[in-house]
């Protein structure tokens, strides 16, 4: 993969770019790893996207394990090298079983699940990505388990991380320090 974007020099940042960078670095992420140095070339987009991302990552109402599981499903579906590289260790630390993460990465048959919530998140995400819809049965299970607001937030989390994956893939961006690829190119 070759990064298609011009090199960004923070010392040459416009005031709008500096405002975005400062907000990201002082927020819960604390780093610019991921799509941010791509989006920074469009600072208004970067500001809106990073704020949405902070909500989708930290405030959906889902436990961190389930959010990270949904992100791994997204990274696998989009074969987003950097997204997987960044979120795989976070997911494992949050309690996603390593065997489940590996089954999702290799995207073969539906993995087996020890936790019903994991199965629900996987079903919801894969139905949305594959059918471009979620069945009435899966939707009803999600609303029953998580409620309407959190189900809406789950859809938003999946959409946001699809945007992240598209950004990383189109512009050939890898994570800081990434030397291997989890998906074939």
Image (cartoon, helix red, strand yellow):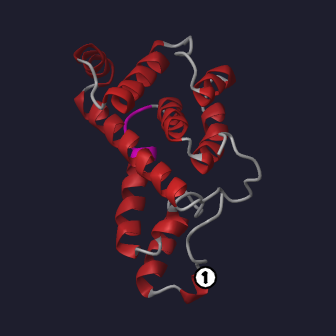
Q: Is residue 167 left or right of residue 2?
A: left
* Vertical comparison of 169 with 42: above or below: above
Image quadrant in which the C terminus is located: top right
> Quarter-wise, where is residue 57 in the image?
top left
Q: Give the residues drawn in magenta, as a range.
A: 56-62
Residue drawn at 74 percent across, 58 percent down: 177
Residue, disc 1: 9
Q: Residue 7: x and y, percent?
A: 61, 77
For residue 52, say whether it is visible.
yes
Identify which residue is drawn at 30% across, 17% down: 138
- Residue for point 29% across, 31% down: 151
Q: Secondary structure at mark 1?
A: loop
Q: Quadrant of the N terminus?
A: bottom right
How many numbered tags mark residues here?
1
- Report whether 116 appears left or right of 151: right
Task: Write the residue at 57% across / 47% down.
Answer: 83
Vertically, is 113 above or below 182? above
Residue nearer the viewer, 71 or 184: 184
Q: Position of residue 159 (x, y in %)?
A: 36, 44
Residue 158 is situated, as x and y percent measured from the top left of the image, at 39, 39
Above or below — where is 21 with respect to 180? Answer: below
User: Does residue 50 show up magenta in the picture?
Assistant: no
């Amino acid at each position: 993969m070759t990064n298609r974007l011009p090199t960004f020099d923070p010392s040459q940042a416009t005031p709008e770019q500096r405002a975005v960078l400062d907000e990201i670095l002082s927020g819960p992420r604390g780093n610019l790893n991921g799509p941010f140095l791509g989006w920074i070339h469009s600072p208004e987009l970067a500001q809106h996207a990073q704020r949405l991302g902070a909500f989708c990552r930290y405030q959906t109402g889902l436990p961190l394990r389930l959010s990270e599981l949904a992100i791994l499903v997204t990274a696998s579906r989009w074969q987003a090298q950097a997204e997987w590289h960044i979120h795989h260790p976070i997911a494992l630390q949050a309690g996603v079983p390593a065997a489940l993460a590996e089954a999702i990465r290799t995207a073969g048959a539906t993995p087996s699940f020890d936790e019903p919530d994991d199965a629900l998140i996987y079903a919801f995400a894969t139905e949305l990505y594959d059918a471009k819809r979620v069945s009435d049965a899966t939707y009803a299970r999600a609303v029953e388990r998580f409620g309407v607001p959190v189900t809406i937030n789950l859809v938003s989390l999946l959409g946001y991380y699809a945007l992240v994956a598209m950004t990383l893939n189109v512009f050939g961006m890898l994570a800081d320090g990434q030397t291997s690829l989890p998906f074939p190119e």
